[in-house]
């Protein structure tokens, strides 16, 4: 399972994700098997299409990793006409979502 810890939006100020910090979580999701590194959004979408689980991750006050349910692919209107793919996470109150993650 992969974890996203931060997001970077396009420099134009558009609400479009350019990159994420994504790493490989250990099997029980208690730590990192491969530390998060910058990844273009298209690679995240490719992993979702291949069937990999991707979650939003943050540390709680005690340092324990807390994660969302797996992301899903969403298709939305493009700012330039047509359609584009993006990612979304289920809305839950006690787990992180994209809006809760820091920017980098």
Image (spheres, helix red, strand yellow):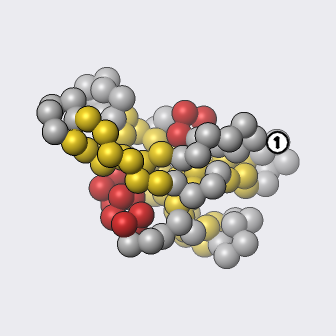
Please state, as top left, top right, bottom left or bottom right, where the N terminus lies in the image: bottom right
Residue 49 in the image: above or below residue 13:
below
* Position in image of residue 8 (x %, y %): 40, 39
Residue lying furthest left: 81
Q: Is residue 68 visible?
A: yes
Q: Is residue 102 above or below residue 35?
A: above
Q: Which residue is mark 1?
A: 61
Q: Position of residue 81 (x, y in %)?
A: 14, 33
Q: Quadrant of residue 78?
A: top left
Q: Is residue 27 left or right of residue 78?
A: right
Q: Secondary structure at mark 1?
A: loop
Asked whether the viewer can see residue 39, the reply is no
Furthest residue in direction bottom, as rendered? 27
Give the image quarter of residue 25: bottom right
Residue at the farthest right position = 62
Q: Decide if residue 94 is on the left or right side of residue 38.
A: right
Identified at 49% across, 35% down, the residue is: 103
Q: Is residue 19 left or right of residue 12?
A: right
**Image side of residue 19 versus residue 63, left or right:** left
- Residue density around tag 1, few if under 14, some if 14–19, many if 20 or more, within 10 Å: few
Of 88 and 31, the residue lying toward us: 88
Q: Position of residue 2 (x, y in %)?
A: 54, 64
Q: Where residue 52 sits in the image (x, y, percent)?
A: 48, 70
Q: Residue at x 61, y 40 (%)?
A: 91
Q: Which residue is located at x 44 percent, y 71 percent?
A: 51
């Amino acid at each position: 399972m992969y974890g996203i810890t931060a997001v970077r939006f396009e420099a134009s100020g558009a609400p479009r994700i350019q990159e994420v910090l994504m790493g490989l979580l250990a099997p029980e999701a208690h730590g990192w098997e491969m530390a998060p590194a910058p990844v273009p959004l298209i690679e995240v979408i490719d992993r979702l299409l291949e069937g990999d689980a991707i979650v939003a991750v943050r540390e709680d006050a005690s340092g324990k990793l807390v994660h969302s349910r797996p992301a899903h692919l969403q298709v939305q209107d493009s700012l330039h006409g047509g359609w584009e793919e993006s990612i979304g996470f289920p809305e839950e109150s006690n787990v992180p979502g994209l809006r809760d993650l820091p920017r980098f």
